[in-house]
Amino acid sequence: MNDILDLSTQQLRHVADLKEKIESLQQELTRVLGGAAPVGAAASKGSKRAYRISPAARARIAAAQRARWAKFHAGRPVRKKLRIMSAAAKAKIAAAARRRWAAAKAAGKSRL
């Protein structure tokens, strides 16, 4: 970026002319090739990627990542599954909370 600041006005004009020539040549090339998408910065206008990954390549990448994950986690101990509370236990807790709130409201409190 500092190189641009050090250029003279004549050099800047020359750079701008070259850029215009490059763009016109790219347009001509696109027209000659029958509208094939150009490669590079001009291709990424409107999209964030200049290329697309095929489903096969995406599958290979995913498989490699799964293998890396498995290798990394191979020697680690497996965590126990968390216990799941039964519906009856949830109902008991909810009923106790309702009783506490009823008692608090009867005492004229707005918080416990």
Image (spheres, helix red, strand yellow):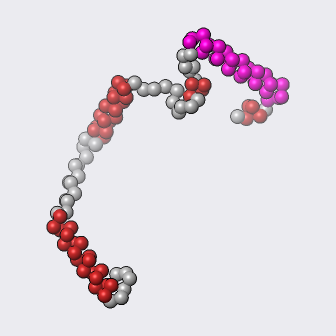
Find residue 8 and report its horizontal and vertical position in percent.
Answer: 83, 29
Q: Quick one: quadrant of the C terminus?
A: bottom left
Residue under the image location 28 percent in, 82 percent down: 102
Find residue 17 and report its horizontal and vertical position in percent.
Answer: 76, 21
Residue 64 showing in the rendered view? no
Q: Nearer the viewer, residue 29 or 70?
A: 29
Q: Nearer the viewer, residue 74 or 22?
A: 22
The majority secondary structure of the magenta stretch comes to: helix
Q: Quick one: quadrant of the N terminus?
A: top right
Q: Which residues are magenta?
A: 7-34
Quarter-wise, where is residue 21 in the image?
A: top right
Residue under the image location 72 percent in, 21 percent down: 20
Residue under the image location 65 percent in, 13 percent down: 28
Find out whether residue 66 is within the magenta segment. no
Quarter-wise, where is residue 32 in the image?
A: top right
Find residue 80 and report its horizontal and vertical position in percent.
Answer: 20, 54
Q: Is residue 22 above or below residue 90?
A: above
Q: Is residue 7 left or right of residue 85?
A: right
Residue 84 showing in the rendered view? yes
Number of numbered discs = 0
Quarter-wise, where is residue 89 in the image?
A: bottom left
